[in-house]
């Protein structure tokens, strides 16, 4: 008998797949310049926005980043 997989609060694999699919739909018909412009704006997804902010933040001498 197979047990059903548990659904967790955040399923990282499904979340990553969903975000990737959403991004692919948004940029499918964009030129390279349009994609660069699109990438320069802060994402609306909370988790992706946090990663974006970390990428844009200057290195503060090893300060720990907390979410």
Image: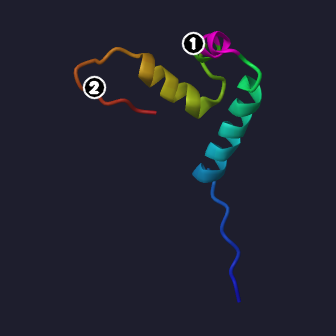
Task: Pick out the residue farthest to the bottom.
Answer: 1
Quadrant location of the N terminus in the rendered image: bottom right
On whether residue 32 falls in the magenta region, the answer is: yes
Residue for badge 2: 63
Q: Position of residue 26 (x, y in %)?
A: 75, 25
> Residue 36's image quarter?
top right
Left or right relative to 66: residue 5 = right
Prevailing SS of the magenta stretch: helix
> Which of the marked residues, 1 or 2, is nearer the chain's N terminus?
1
Residue for badge 1: 40
Total tally of numbered discs in the picture:
2
Q: Residues within 10 Å of mark 1 (few under 14, many from 20)?
A: few
Q: Position of residue 59 (x, y in %)?
A: 30, 18
Left or right relative to 22: residue 37 = left
Q: Name the residue located 71 percent from the left edge and 24 percent from the top edge.
A: 27
Residues 59 and 34: in front is 34
Q: Residues within 10 Å of mark 2 (few under 14, many from 20)?
A: few
Q: Name the residue located 37 percent from the left edge and 29 percent from the top edge.
A: 65
**Secondary element type, mark 1:** loop
Magenta extent: 31-37
Can residue 11 be seen from the camera position used here? no
**Secondary element type, mark 2:** loop
Q: Position of residue 32 (x, y in %)?
A: 63, 15
Q: Position of residue 19 (x, y in %)?
A: 67, 38
């Amino acid at each position: 008998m197979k047990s059903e997989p548990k659904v967790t609060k955040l399923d990282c694999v499904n979340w990553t797949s969903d975000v990737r699919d959403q991004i692919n739909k948004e940029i499918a018909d964009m030129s390279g310049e349009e994609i660069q412009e699109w990438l320069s704006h802060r994402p609306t997804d909370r988790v992706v926005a946090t990663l974006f902010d970390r990428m844009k933040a200057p290195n503060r001498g090893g300060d720990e980043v907390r979410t």
